[in-house]
Image (cartoon, rainbow, N blue to C red):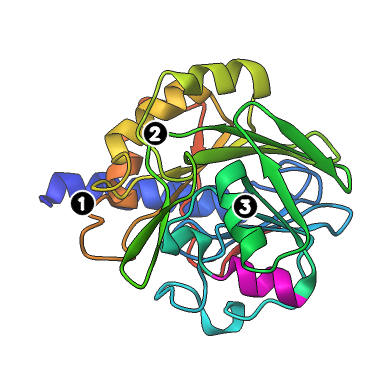
Amino acid sequence: MGRKGLGVFVVSFFFVSFFFSSSLPAAEIGQGVKITYLGHAAFKLVSAQGVVIYIDPYLKNNPQTPPEHKEVDKADLILITHGHGDHLGDAVAIAQKTNASAVAMAELATYLTQKGLKNVVRMNKGGSYTAKGIRVTLVNAQHSSSVTEEGRVIYTGEPGGFIIRFENGFTVYHAGDTAVMADMKIFGDIYKPNLALLPIGSHFTMDPVEAAYACQLLRPQFAIPMHYKTFPVLTGTPEAFLQAMKDQPGVKVLVINPGQTIE
């Protein structure tokens, strides 16, 4: 990175850090909704009423997840975008421990039932499910989905993303693993997400430039980059995403570290 590029990043990162620390009261980001980044594509969301949601809880073997977040004692909903191990992660163990409802694509839900889970919500794209005042919609993603056991690949249905609408109307879009796609404009038109959680790592998902284009389609107020730096092959960076987003002043990019919570 040249001096000019480094200067742009430093200024941009200072702006994002200042905006994050000084200008985001809880009411502005969802009136009490708490969002904790756990590394890779894993998030913990807590509603204003205390409903605990985990998304793609790849924790114990996740090199980015801080040690204090690797064990889960309470969960109400576990949303799983697809079957790959770095997303399905510890969902089965967490659901067994907490009795949380696991929400997933129909084929992946069947797999979870076969693993002994009792509270499994089978969904498909376009469908919505409401629990504890939280409305969850399963939407399209462009990727693949499978589980590998003892060298055998098990198909777990198509991949997806989730639109989560909280009791107070605050709406979060977790894209899962995906390429940029025209469907994102539909998500922006219909669901109007306040916050988009977008992969930027490239190789397996869209890269920073494509994620910035996704923001043009989605039109969120805030965007948090995810699915980067976990493995060497994921070469997309927050710096590149910030640079790609410089022409979209209406979207505030929040670069947060694993373990950090927006309250």
Q: Which residues are magenta?
A: 90-97
45 vs 16, nearest the viewer: 45
For marks 3 and 2, the one nearer the N-term is 3
For marks 1 and 3, the one nearer the N-term is 1
**What amino acid type should be assigned to the residue bearing mark 2?**
Gln
Q: SS class of the residue under badge 3?
A: helix
Q: Nearer the viewer, mark 3 or mark 2?
A: 3
251 vs 160, nearest the viewer: 160
Whether residue 196 is visible here, answered yes or no, is no
Q: Residue at x 48, y 45 (%)?
A: 176
Q: In the visual, does 120 lie left or right of 262?
A: right
Can you tell which mark lies on residue 6?
1
Pointer 2: what residue?
142
Residue 101 screen position, x and y as percent: 76, 57
Q: SS class of the residue under badge 2?
A: loop
Q: Quadrant of residue 127?
A: top right
